[in-house]
Amino acid sequence: MTSERTTLYRDKQNGKLLGVCAGIADYTGVDALWVRLGAIVLAFSTGIAIPAYFVFGMLLGKKPAHLYVEPEEQKYWQRVRQSPARTAREVRARFRDIDRRLADVETYYVTSNPRLSAEIERLR
C-alpha cells in the first residue's frame, strides 16, 4: 500500500506556513482547523511540537497537484487510509449489489423473451 495516494504529504496550497497541518488533515480526513488547534495545544503543553513541525516540513514531500481528480476520490482515499479493511468490505458489497442487479436484469429479459432464453441455453 505504498501508492502515492496513501502517502503523507505537505499540502502547501491549503497550508498556512509549511503545509504540514493541512497535509495531516488531508491524510486523515480531519478538518485542518482541528489539526492546527491540536498542534497549538501541543506547542504550548510540550516544547516538541514546534521543532517536530519544522522537521516534518523538511522531510515530507509536496502534495502532487494531480493527486485527486474529484472530491469523491479524495474522500475515498481518506477512508482507505483510515480503514483499508472496511473500505474493501464496502467495495465488495457494492460489487455484490451490482452483480445482483445485473442478474435481475438478465432474469427479466430472459423470462420475457423466450428466443433470447433459448439462445443463452444453447450457448451454455
Image (tube, helix red, strand yellow):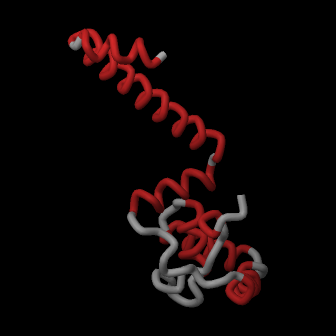
When the figure is inspected, residue 71 is found, relative to residue 98, above or below; the finding is below
> Which quadrant of the structure image shows residue 48?
bottom right
**Quadrant in the picture for the N terminus:** bottom right
When the figure is inspected, residue 27 is found, relative to residue 10, above or below; the finding is above
When the figure is inspected, residue 123 is found, relative to residue 90, above or below; the finding is above
> Which quadrant of the structure image shows residue 86?
top right
Residue at left offset 58%, top offset 61%: 28
Percent across and percent down for residue 10 are 60, 80
Residue at left offset 33%, top offset 20%: 106
* Camera-nearest residue between 87 and 110: 110
Percent across and percent down for residue 65 are 49, 81
* Camera-nearest residue between 89 and 50: 89
Residue at left offset 52%, top offset 37%: 90
Residue at left offset 62%, top offset 52%: 82
Percent across and percent down for residue 40 are 61, 77
> Is residue 104 found left or right of 12 in the rendered image?
left
